[in-house]
Amino acid sequence: MRKIIWLGLLSISICLWTSFAFAQDFSRRLTLGLKGGIWKSGLTEHSDIYTVGNQGALFFRYDLKEKISLGFWVTYAKAWEADLSGRGDAGAGFTFSQKDDADQFTHVWLDFSLIYRFRPWERLNPYVFGGIGLAFWKVQDEDGKSVQILDRDQDPFDLKDQELTFSGGGGVEYRFREKWGLDFGTRFRLLTHVLTNFRGSKDIVGARPGELDLPKVTLEIFLGINYYFGKLKDTDKDGVPDRVDFCADTPFGAMVDERGCPLDSDGDGIYDGLDKCPHTPSKIKADVNGCPLE
């Protein structure tokens, strides 16, 4: 657990340092998010014994380009032994029902991924992502003590491990304010068993009766809220970000449309916001302030 904490703190420090290093480039943005949801382990041969679990995550995203970002998740998740009475050989399946004195299955996931956002400049923004990570898990009894099992030499050891994971998924963000957004998505993880401790006399993982059958995938659904740091770059200060501004040299103070182009309601050549006589009749010459010439 100490390694997990240090790795998490190191990753957070890198993200924060990156945000300060690019503090003058407001087109690059750091996003912080909190997420929660449900998850389920799957693709087991004979021991689907755990309930649908709950999970919460701290999320960081740094925009590398307009549509491409680097993401980092720290997720804490739990599930419990399911009540299998009346289920026969079907296993736990999609259930929240725990058995009495249920053991708990605890995970910490560290995930790094590349995120592709299809429409980052709009309120509704779908995205997809994929990446690599580490999973740390353990099984504890109802009192929080480690559950032990026997290796091939009949020696007891704690039921816990770590492994390399690959993940992918997608979702949609809804930005309801300039710096706040809602995030709904789904993710799957492929558990590779790379870096596992189940080797040598502890190599008891398998699908045969009596062997430890670990899940091969997890699936999760999450809902979260994001906060966006910094501001988008707006060179002409007209309120429309450079990346969607079709008139990038608008004079300061001029009123613009949604594309960032200046408005001239009375057609006298002086932009709204700078025009001191905004209702000049058509075909009447105006001075530099937009007022009719006598």
Image: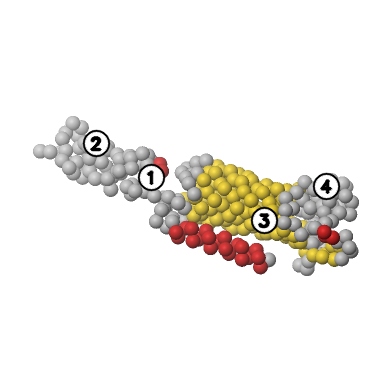
Sequence-first tag of 1 and 3: 3
What is the residue that sits farthest to the top in this orientation?
A: 283
Determine which residue is flagged by label 2: 266
Residue 283: x and y in percent read 18, 31
Residue type at numbered disc 3:
Leu
* Cα gap from disc 4 to disc 1, whole angstroms: 54 Å
Q: In the drawing, does residue 68 fall left or right of residue 242?
A: right
The mark found on residue 242 in the picture is 1
Relative vertical location of residue 131 with respect to residue 270 in this rendering, above or below:
below
Residue type at numbered disc 4:
Glu
Q: Nearer the viewer, mark 3 or mark 2?
A: 3
Residue at 49% in and 55% down = 30
Please name whichever residue, 173 or 199, is drawn nearer the observer in this view of the structure. Answer: 199
* Cα gap from disc 2 to disc 1, whole angstroms: 27 Å
Determine which residue is flagged by label 4: 45
Sequence-first tag of 2 and 1: 1
Determine which residue is flagged by label 3: 134
Q: In the drawing, does residue 87 fall left or right of residue 230?
A: right
SS class, disc 1: helix
Residue at 77% in and 46% down = 43
